[in-house]
Structure formats: structure tokens, C-alpha cells
Image: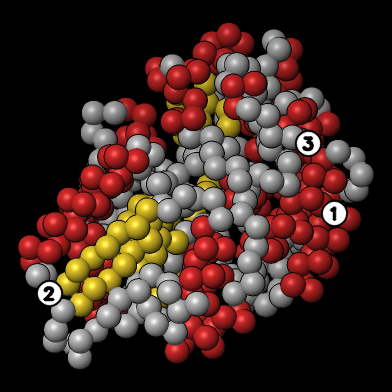
Amino acid sequence: MRLRRFAPVAVAALVAGLLTACGGGSDAGGGGKQSITMWIYPVIPDEATHRGFWDKQVAAFKADHPDIDVKVEIFPWAKREESLTTAIAGGKGPDVVYLIPDQLGKFNKMIEPVDDYLPADAKADYRENVRAAVTLDGKMLGAPILTSSNPLMCNAKVFTATGVTEYPKTWADLLALAPRFKAKGFDVTNYYADPNATLNQSFYPLLWQAGGDVFSADGKSVTFNGPAGVKALTFLKQLVDGGYVEKDLITSIPAFEQTNVAKNKVACTWQHVPADVEKFWGKENIKIFPPLSDARSVGYGTVGSLSILKGSKAKKAAGEWVSFVTAPAVASAYDTAGGYFSAKTSAGSLYPQDPVNTEMEKTLSSTTVGALNEKSREVMGVLAPEIQAALIGKKTPEQALADAAKAAQALL
């Protein structure tokens, strides 16, 4: 689970400058030598492996596109938005950049839609929810290269220790099981309420499961303070007030090794994935299920995509590169090296010999990233502290969400 939420940056004022700024590439009248630059981040954790992967792809692409030079620059995750904003403002932005959905909303006016640069069959090959995750106003703002899922993950060891044989499917199931786990010294789940924890993996899945959303359909107002939001926050408060979740996580983010999840004291979670817990639980104890449901079953899943910036002076060449590296053969190799899943239906199962990841793949169609909105990060910033205030008893769920909505509406 990536708990860091990067500080918001102001980008709207840069739009006018971007439209006349130079990109990282060069175009010799459409017929000569062209060069493009792509900014990527450590999707594959091992630096040497990551660099080797892209060196191999650049060489393969060059063999078929001798007139296009590609430079891949790998940057750290930290402060990536600030760095990108600064580069764009100075006319030194890349031609292609890796972005996740809430960044697509923020930078959307600076992005060249990829619709005209991808073959029709390639666009049709994307999972429906993956394509929706990068689409705004009917246009694809990026070509997805990976996806993930945060379904319900349970620890079989904890269920055995408590004598519980039925795994939860709904909120009601989880609440009904909570006292039984508590009586044996276990938490039924965990919840990070510290404002530095992303709501994408904590509160928003519950909001969606209750039938709600963060923004209205037109993106001009917030709706998280409606009945679905109140129901989701009330559900969380029941868990906290009942002593069914780890108290420390409501106000802090301790080292993972110090949490009850790592100590095999938590029954189920939607805030972690197998890679987080395998060395603590043992792979044989990891059980994957569809996301919890109330009105519907839905969980969070990220989508990483490659976007072409409007400032690029070699958009056609950038489009050729993006099309090449997001094709199933290349993207699947990247996904497995980074521990992610394919955004394409034709790729099939990437982990046929791995029962845990096979079950994870089955949940990909039940994920969403929520609505794309340029104020997503800022709205999360005003909502998270109010959720925490409700959970520590300073405000009622209704008041906390109303106060957050007032602040969020001012941002919109």
C-alpha cells in the first residue's frame, strides 16, 4: 500500500505557457530524425532490472523505427508532480510521462489525448473499467500499461485460530464477525485514518460500495456528503467504537512491521495487497475475495498510463513509442516484473502458476479509480482530516462530511 499522498501543486496557470512551450522531442518537418523523451518512475523496484527493461525496449523499438531516438529517464516517486510542473513551465517537459488517474485529472489540459495515436484494436483490447479510468470528456488521456486491485484479502491463519469458517462478503457480515474475532484477541479489519493515508485505498472504496461517489457526474460539485457517504463513515465509526480495528492507525502510520496486520492479528483488509503481507502471513494463508459489498461490490485499483504532452514537438513519434510499449507483449513483461496486472484483455492470465495472483486477476473487473477531476488531490486533502475527526469522536459523521463538503466546494 502506498500511503504517501503527494502535496497538491497548482497547474492551471501553466496551461497557456504549455501550449507554446517546447517539448522534450524534436521534429524535422515530419520526415527526418526525431527524438523523444519519456519520464517513468520505479514501477520495477530494482533499479538495474528497471533500467535493463527499458534499454531492451528502446533497442527493439529502434530496430523498427530507425529515425526515432528514444530516451527513457527514470525519476523517483517523491516530488514527481512538482518536478513535472516545473519542467513543463520551463518548456523542458518530456514528450511522454507515466501518470496515474488523479494526475490525469490535474494535468488534463496539458495532455494530448492518445485516441488518434493508438490502433482501434489496441483501444478495444483494454478492459472496460481500465479504459474508463483514463477517459475524460470522451477522450483517452493516457495509454494504460498496468493495473492493480485492492480486493478483500483475508488471513486464513486468523480464521483458523478463531474457529470462523465463513469469510465475509458484505459490511453486515464483517460487523457480525467482529465480536467473535475481538473475543479471541484479533481485529476484524484495519483502517488508516491518518490524513497522510490515501483515501483511494481506505474511505473511497466504502463510499463506492454504499452506492456513492466523490464528485457529481459533471464534476462541478462533491457528493461524498450524501447518504452513501454518511453510511460509509457511520460503518467505519462502528468498527472504531467497537474496538474492532487497531486504534493506533486512526491517528498515525506506524512502520508496517509494527501493525496488527503484520503481526497476524487482523482477519481481513482491503488496504493491503499480497506483496505487503506475504512474508508475514505466508502465501498459503492469503485468501483473496471480491471487494466487500453494501449496495455493490467494488474496490480500488490503480491504472498506470503513458501520456503524451501537448508541448511535445514530436507527437507522432511519441505516439508510435506509446503504442509499441503498451502492446500486450511488452506491457505484460513490464507488469510481471513490477508485480502488476495487464490492462489488456488479450493478455490473459499473467500468473498461471500463482494461485494468489490468479485470484487477484479475477477481481480486476470489480475495481475503479473513481471520477477524474483536476481537484481530486485537493478534495482528498480537506476530506481526510474530517473523516479522522469523526472517527476520534470530535464530530458526527454528518457534521464531518458537511464541513469537508463546504471546504471542497470552495476548491471547485
Query: Tag 1: residue type?
Result: Ala
Instruction: Give percent across and percent down for residue 145.
Output: 32, 56
Q: Relative to 283, does residue 290 appear above or below in the rendering?
A: below
Position of 200 with respect to 132 (left or right) is right
First in residue order: circle 1 vs circle 3: 3
Q: Are marks 2 and 1 in contact (CB under 8 Å)?
A: no
Q: Which mark is residue 12?
A: none
Q: Residue at x 14, y 62 (%)?
A: 61
Q: Secondary structure at mark 2?
A: loop
Q: Which mark is residue 251?
A: 3
Instruction: Give percent across and percent down for residue 215.
Output: 65, 67
Choose mark 1 or mark 3, whichever is in front.
3
Query: Tag 2: residue type?
Result: Asp
Q: Nearer the viewer, residue 275 or 356?
A: 275
Q: Nearer the viewer, residue 168 or 386?
A: 386
First in residue order: circle 2 vs circle 1: 2
Instruction: Give percent across and percent down for residue 347.
Output: 22, 50
Q: Secondary structure at mark 1?
A: helix
To which quarter of the image does residue 401 belong?
A: bottom right
Marks 1/3: CA–CA distance: 16 Å
Instruction: Give percent across and percent down for residue 123.
Output: 28, 69
Residue that carries the numbered disc 1 in the rendered image: 400
Residue that carries the numbered disc 2 in the rendered image: 67
Query: Tag 3: residue type?
Result: Thr
Residue 293 appears anywhere in the view: no
Choose mark 2 or mark 1, whichever is in front.
2
Q: Secondary structure at mark 3?
A: loop
Position of 356 with respect to 292 (left or right) is left
Q: Residue at x 40, y 20 (%)?
A: 283
**Colour mapping used in the image:** secondary structure
